[in-house]
Each structure stands twice: as C-alpha cells, then as structure tokens.
Amino acid sequence: MKNEKKFRKNMKLSTGFFIILFSILILYMGYSVIRNGTSWYATPYNPRIANARSNIRGGTIYDRNGVKLAWSQDSKRQYNETKEIRRACSHVVGDIYGKSIGIETTYAKQLYGLENDLFTLIQRFISGDYKGKNGKDVTLTIDSELSRFIYKEMKGRRGSVVVMNYKTGEIISSVSILTFDPSTVNKDKLEDTALVDRATMGRYPPGSIMKIVTASRAIDMGISMEYECTGETVIGGQKVTCKHVHGKQNLEEAFANSCNTYFAELSVKIGGGSLLSQAEKFKFNRTFKYSDFTLYRSNFEVSSEKGDIAWAGIGQYNDLITPTHAALMVSAVANDGVMPEPKLVRKVGDTDNMSWNLISQDRIISSATSGKLKEMMKKAVDEGTGTSAKIPGFNVYGKTGTAEYVEDGKVKNHSWFGGFLDEDKPYAVAVILEGAGFGSSAAAPLAKKIFEYIILEASL
C-alpha cells in the first residue's frame, strides 16, 4: 500500500512535469511563429513561396520615383527593360529563385499577399492554399537612374557604392559589382561572387577611413598631439610608413594628409581598450538588426601589443567593415553625431514605411565632436588627400582610405572614400573599389561624379 501511494505520487509529479514541458513547448512555438514568421517566409528555401508564386499575381517593385523594377505578367516575373538598370539594382531587387537575398525574397510575404494573422499563417503553412490572391506593391528608397549612373561610372571595377540620406536613413543607391541580371540569372553562368551583395555582405579592411573613429576618440579625450612625421615609425617592433614625409603635424593636419605614423602613435596614446570602446560606439562588433535587409557584422579588435593597436587605429590589423556600415559611419558625422536607421523600403501597398525615422535615431558621438570631425573632413577635401572629390562652389566633406591586402603573395590596395554634402543636399556616400589603388586616385574621383550627379541631375 505504501509503495502504491508512492507510485501514484510519482506518476502525478511526472505527469505534471510533462504537462509543464508541453505547455512551454507550445508557448515557444507560438512565440517563434510570431517572432520569426517573417524570416521563415523570407528564406529562399521556403516551398510555400514557390507555390504562392505560381498561383498569385505578385506585387510590383518600384523605385522611389515610380520606375517599375519588377512585376508579374502572365504568371511570369518581369524586370525593367533597361539592362543597365536591371544589373545596377540586381542585389537590391533580388530574383525569384532565391539565388540572391533581395526584396524579392525578404519581402516575398508582402509581394505575394501572405500577410495574415497567426492562425491563418499556420493554416497556410499547412495547406498551401493561396489561390485567388494578389500581392502588395513595394516602393523602394533607391533611385534607379542614379544607380545606373553609378554602375556605368564604376566601369566594370569590382566593389560597391552606397548613397544614403543621412537625415532619414533612406538608401538612395546600393550598387554591387560583380553583379547579375535577374531576368536571366537562372540560366547565366556567373562568376563565383556575382550573387554576393558587396554593399551589405562584403567585409573589407577600412584603411584610413577608420581614422574617423580614431580622431573622434582623440577629440573626446582632449588629446592635442603634435608629431614630426619622417615617413616611418617603429611601434612595438612593427614598422608603419607614410606615402610622404609630412613633417610637423597636429590632429587636423594629420587627418587631412592621412598621416599613418601620426595616427599610429595617436592610437597607442589613446590605448587599445579606449579605441575598442569607441569603435563599438560606431557599431563595430555589433549584430545589426534592420527590418529591410541583413547587414553583416563589422570587426574591430586590438591586442596587448602596441604595434597591433597602432595598425588597428589606422584601419588595418584585423579591422573589417561593409560599405553600408561605412556609409552609416559618415552619415553619423554629417548628422551631428546621430546614426540613422538605414531603410530600403519606402512603402508597402498604401502603407508608409518611413514613419519610424523620428524614433530610430542613435546618437553615437556628441554634436561637438561631430562638428570638429566635419571641419577635419572639409579640410581633407579642400587641401588634403581628398582634393579629387572637391567641387567648386560646393562644400564637400570626406575621408580617403587606402586599405592594404595580400593576394597571390602580393600587397595590393583597395580604394576607399567616405563623405557627404551640406544639409541642403543631405547625402552621404561610401565608395570601395577593389584593388584600385589609393583612395585619392580612384574612389574619391568617383565620389565627386556621384555628388555632381546628385547636385545637378538627381530627382531626389
């Protein structure tokens, strides 16, 4: 009798335990559907989307000016009739086969009318019943003509250009080369990285555009260092060199001249921990969570070695950044120290997707620090390494970068430029041209052409 009572008690405890576990599982599944339902739909491997595409008239994807980039006709997906626009906007628009991760995939739920409440969502997952539905149109923030202009001006060079409204976070253009044609992607023979969106997935050493972060920390700490550049210095047994012998330099002059030895010594003076903290304010080593696209994580690290700290402070060592993050970084400087949330979608159906922008700003540096950086970036374009981005009669702010990398045993250089215009034209640009040499000779002249186009021709 005693053993029977004990057995019954254990059974009740076990039953209660399993009921609790089952309840937790059901709650977790419900939470997962609510939290991750959109991302589940957005995977290119979701067979429900493939089924929906064969039964639903998909919505049209427009650029910011109403230019049709993709639409459904006779059960087939059509793309813009101009090949240069198709290729310039390919990574943003994406394709229906899920080979790339563009709007065709990330907004498939909206484009194919799959937006429903939780219970209908589960029902459609199970049944695949989509017939008789129409999808919603999606209007993007990009300007297709500006994108085509950039695509043509890149002249086949590999790399990426991102143009952003630094007040609203709207991405006005995001061009990645190598590229592809969404209308023929399923049968074309593509080079290995043509489907990779370099703007959001390409992680490059930032080179001297990293000096924006290093200089901002020096300003915050009140460091006013003067230094004699002889063209090279040795820090912790590691040699750092400059292209020129710059002579006596202060912070503003060293920034304008992109003096490596000055910033290497400055980085050691700031300290590895302090540099790391400042880089993380600028969103390095952070997981980006944006609603319109996935942005790969940028990297900044230091060691206890002074030589490593020196190289990290000038954008080498193990530093990595995406072009979109670079555009966000210069946007924060332009926007009085506030980094906007980047947006790629302006409207879904009749719903404005931009109402978020008043509450999603993120202050990363003070207004005073950003003001000082603006002055330094203006000087860099007016009389420093960025003069090839200068436009007579207009204020252009910027920083060049020349990022070393090794390929086939040879040291080569990526060409960088990050900059912006005045607030009456609140646009920032980040340019990376792979293996193109110095930032002053390749990326900066391209940035100038983009700024001229925005000033004179763009209907933004």
Image (cartoon, helix red, strand yellow):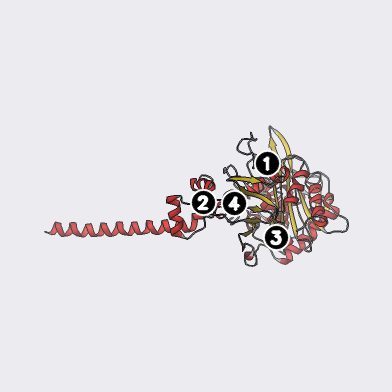
* Residue under label 3: 332
Q: Position of residue 429 (x, y in %)?
A: 74, 53
CA separation in Å, label 2 and label 4: 15 Å
Mark 2 or mark 1: whose residue is earlier in sequence:
2
Q: Amino acid at mark 2?
A: Tyr
Q: Secondary structure at mark 2?
A: helix
Relative to the observer, which residue lies in front, 429 or 37?
Answer: 37
Q: Which mark is residue 294?
A: 4
Q: Which mark is residue 348?
A: none
* Residue under label 1: 179
Contact (CB < 8 A) between labels 1 and 4? no
Residue drawn at point x = 44 percent, y = 55 percent: 122
Relative to the observer, which residue lies in front, 266 or 219?
Answer: 219
Question: Which of pointers 4 and 3 indicates the residue nearer the eye?
Answer: 4
* Residue under label 2: 41
Task: Kindly indicate the quadrant of the structure image that contains residue 44.
Answer: top right
In the rendered image, the quadrant that contains the C terminus is bottom right
Mark 1 or mark 3: whose residue is earlier in sequence:
1
